[in-house]
Structure formats: C-alpha cells, structure tokens
Amino acid sequence: MIVIYGLLVHLLFASISAETDCKRTYIDNESLGKCFKNLTLAHQGRAKLHSIGTSIRGRPIWALEVSSDVDSRRLLKPMFKYVGNLHGDETVGRELIHKLAYYLLENYERDPVVTELMDNIDIFLVPSLNPDGFADSQEGSCKSIEMTNSVLKGRTNSNGVDLNRDFPERLKYSPANIFNGRQPETVHIMKWIMANPFVLSASLHGGSVVASYPYDSGYKDEEYSKTPDDSVFKALSHVYADNHKHMFRGDLCEGDSFSANRGITNGNQWYTVDGGMQDFNYEHSNCFEITIELSCCKYPNRSEINKEWDNNFHSLISFMRTVHWGVKGVISMENGNPVAQAAVEITGISHTVFSTEQGEYWRLLTPGHYTMKVSAPRYPIVQDNMSEVGADAKL
Ligand SMILES: *[C@@H]1O[C@H](CO)[C@@H](O)[C@H](O)[C@H]1NC(C)=O
Ligand SMILES: *[C@@H]1O[C@H](CO)[C@@H](O)[C@H](O)[C@H]1NC(C)=O
Ligand SMILES: *[C@@H]1O[C@H](CO)[C@@H](O)[C@H](O)[C@H]1NC(C)=O
Ligand SMILES: CC(=O)N[C@H]1CO[C@H](CO)[C@@H](O)[C@@H]1O
C-alpha cells in the first residue's frame, strides 16, 4: 500500500514539473510545440499556433501568432515576424523568441506597452526555422562544428545545406519555378513569406553583435549594396542597435568593426551573402527584413540567456513598434470595394508594395515629404502629395 502511494506521489510530481518545464532554456524541439499549444489554450483568442511546414527529419517549424485578435486580424493591423535559428547552431534568437512569447501573453492587459503592442500588431514568432540543425548542435559550442567534408554541422540543415544561401539570388539566374531545387525548410518559409502580407521582420542570428540590412549581395566590386530604401533600413537597424545594452558599441566580438556606424552594417559591405533570406523578403514580398547578430558565442551555455534577454529586451520591443512607420491605408473604389494587388509607389524610391485582398497597404518610410502613386490594372492612376509623414503617420 505504502509503495503504491509513493508511486502515485511520484507520478503526480513528475507531471507537475513537466508543466513548469515549458519555460526552460533550450527546451527540446518536441516539447516546444506542446508548450506553445498549451499557451494557446491558456490565452484563447490571443495566441494561435501555426506550423509553416516540417523539416527534413519531420520536425514542425512552429509559428506562434500573438495578438489581441488572432481569430480575425483587424483591417490595417500590420503583420510582423521574428524568425530565429535559421542557422541551427545560432540559438540565442530561438531562446529570446521563446521568452518573448511568454512575456507578451503574460503581460497583456497588465503592462500598457505589451497591451499596446498586441492591440496594434499581429505578431508572428518563429523560434526555430531549422529544428534539425538545432538538434545536431552542441550547447557551449561558440563556433560551428566543422565536419571532415567541410559541412558545418548544425549550422546547416540535415542535407548539409546552409539555408541562408538557399534562397533565390536576385543577381543570379533562378529557374522559372523559384522553388525548384531548394531545401524543404527554405521552400516552406518562402511560401509563407509570399502568401502573407508581412510588413516587417527580423531574422535572429549569432556569431557577432550587429544589425545588418539589405542588400546582402552586390555587383562585382560593389561594397555598400544599397536598396532603394536604404534610409529606412538604416533607421530600422539603428532602432535595434541603439536600444540594445551594447550593440551600438560595434566592437564586441573578435573581428567586429562596426563602431563607426554604431553597431549597424550594410550586409554586402560586411561580407557577401548570395541567396540570403533578408534580400528574398525585400525582393519577393512587401516585407522589409533585417538580420540581427545577437551574441559572439553562437550556442552559449544556458546560464547566459537571461543576460541576453536583458541586453535585447528594449530592442525587441522597440523594433516591433517600427512596423507603424510611414503610411498605411485602404485602397478602394468610390463604392467602397477594396482593390487588391494595387501597386503603391513613392516617387524617387524604386520599390513597389502591393495592396492585400482587403485593399490594405503599408509603406514603411522615414519622416519627410513624399508623393505616392497608386495604380491597378483597369483603374485610373491616383496620385497624392502627402503633406508630411511623421514618425507614426497614418493616411
Ligand atoms: C498549461 O497551461 C496552464 C495554464 O492554463 C499552466 O498552468 C500549465 O503549467 C501549462 N502547462 C505546460 C506544460 O506549459
Ligand atoms: C559552458 O559550461 C561548461 C561547463 O560548466 C564549461 O566547461 C564551458 O567552458 C562553458 N562554455 C562557455 C562557452 O561558456
Ligand atoms: C502634387 O505635386 C505636384 C508637383 O509638386 C503637382 O504638380 C500636383 O498638382 C500635386 N498633386 C496634388 C493632387 O496635389
Ligand atoms: C536539442 C534537443 O533537445 N534536441 C532534441 C530534438 O529532438 C530529438 C528527438 O527527435 C532529440 O533526440 C534531441 O535531443
């Protein structure tokens, strides 16, 4: 009798500790989905779990949507994403995104900043884009593990491919079907990016401490490879670097020399990346993405993560709010019917964004005076001189 009683107590204890385990650092890839699922039950209507697809070894790539109205996004509420762990052995981003999910959901309607964020942004949190690489990586390993065939185990996916070189490269030939020959993880995120009207994103990496922005590739001999939206990208990157405890110093890790630009760099100027994800976002969707390098050590011991949370907390929050920069609006006919796929162009900036099915558009801009042109097949062109775009202007 006593033995059985002891066993029951033991089982009960085991299940309780399994529950609190959800907030552990480096929670294993299988539990992550279960814990996120539980979060959606505890915060109904404010958290929704999506799987973008599965990795080669069958692990789901989770995206947790966090917002005040996940069941139906309010018109003009912009979509934002944080994507981590594209390189499986760069793990700080994975942990920060995991922590951010709990922080937001537990502080909604308690902390006014969090309430404002969730009321006004549809936030998508993707802790690990490369769960197989994460499973192959080693805690405490600050550099990638090089295999005899020179494959970097853990950084790459299960086929040994670096996913941040696997996207269509804007300056090189791509097959007519842009998904042909790419890794499953790459195809899943490409389709997700193209199918949803994300406005802003950050991809979280490790190995340096700097905010890097497109383009990541350039023409021969080109160093600083400017997008038409260079001023927006620079300003976005500064929001992250300036709000970080140390990033703005620009000299934190061996080889980092970003002091002159206070912790930000153009991607190609640092080093050329062909087929990277941030350029893909800009070229193939409405979304602006920057890349954040979070820590010198790629996969630090778990005891370091709380410190990284403190280092990055203000940056993570401030960066999300920049999704409201510039102008937004709904393009419709006089009878109120929305116009989808309308091209929204700003004079002098050769980058077009397109309206959603509901006619919504968002155009990130830095403060200034702009002329905007809207056009759609079979409709007359409309031009509007925007008097002034402030930091939080709405049209
Ligand atoms: C699930 O959510 C409940 C709150 O509804 C919480 O008490 C419990 O610890 C959670 N379990 C896990 C595994 O996270
Ligand atoms: C991680 O922890 C182990 C064991 O405490 C220690 O030997 C190692 O040096 C640590 N690694 C780093 C990168 O701090
Ligand atoms: C916008 O500005 C241009 C040049 O400054 C002017 O020619 C045009 O009439 C203006 N359009 C509107 C709608 O005010
Ligand atoms: C790091 C980590 O926890 N990886 C785990 C991912 O899932 C597999 C099981 O499919 C475990 O073996 C790994 O340890």
Image: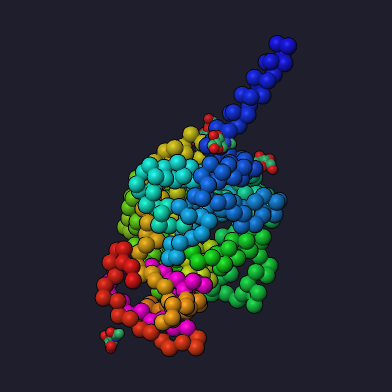
Q: Position of residue 94 (x, y in %)?
A: 53, 47
- Image coordinates for residue 222, horizontal then vertical, percent: 44, 72
Instruction: Give the residue at the far top of this rendering.
Output: 2
In the figure, is residue 68 to the left or right of 61?
left
The residue stretch that appears in magenta: 351-376
| Nearer to us in this view, 126 or 216 | 126
Q: Is residue 270 visible?
A: no
- Please indicate whether residue 237 sits to the left or right of residue 204 in the image: left
Numbered circles on residues, count = 0
Residue at 67% across, 60% down = 184
Q: Quadrant of residue 5?
A: top right
Indicate yes or no whether the magenta region holds residue 354: yes
Q: Give yes or no for residue 154 being in the magenta stretch.
A: no
**Image colouring:** rainbow
- Residue 4, relative to residue 229: is it above or below? above
Q: Ligand 1: which quarter?
A: top right
Q: Position of residue 267 (x, y in %)?
A: 45, 63
* The N terminus lies in quadrant: top right
Instruction: From the viewer's side, name the closer residue of 379 and 171.
Output: 379
382 vs 264: above or below: below
Extreme residue in the left direction: 387
Q: Nearer the viewer, residue 353 or 71?
A: 71
Residue name at image x 65 percent, y 57 percent: 53
- Residue at point 30% right, 80% down? 385
Is residue 312 found left or right of 156 in the rendered image?
left
Q: Main secondary structure of the magenta part?
A: strand
Q: Is residue 368 left or right of residue 236?
A: left
Q: Quadrant of the C terminus?
A: bottom left
Res. 117 visible in picture: yes
Q: Residue 253, percent across and down?
A: 42, 47
Residue at the far front: name it: 335
Residue at image location 48% in from the left, 42% down from the top: 102
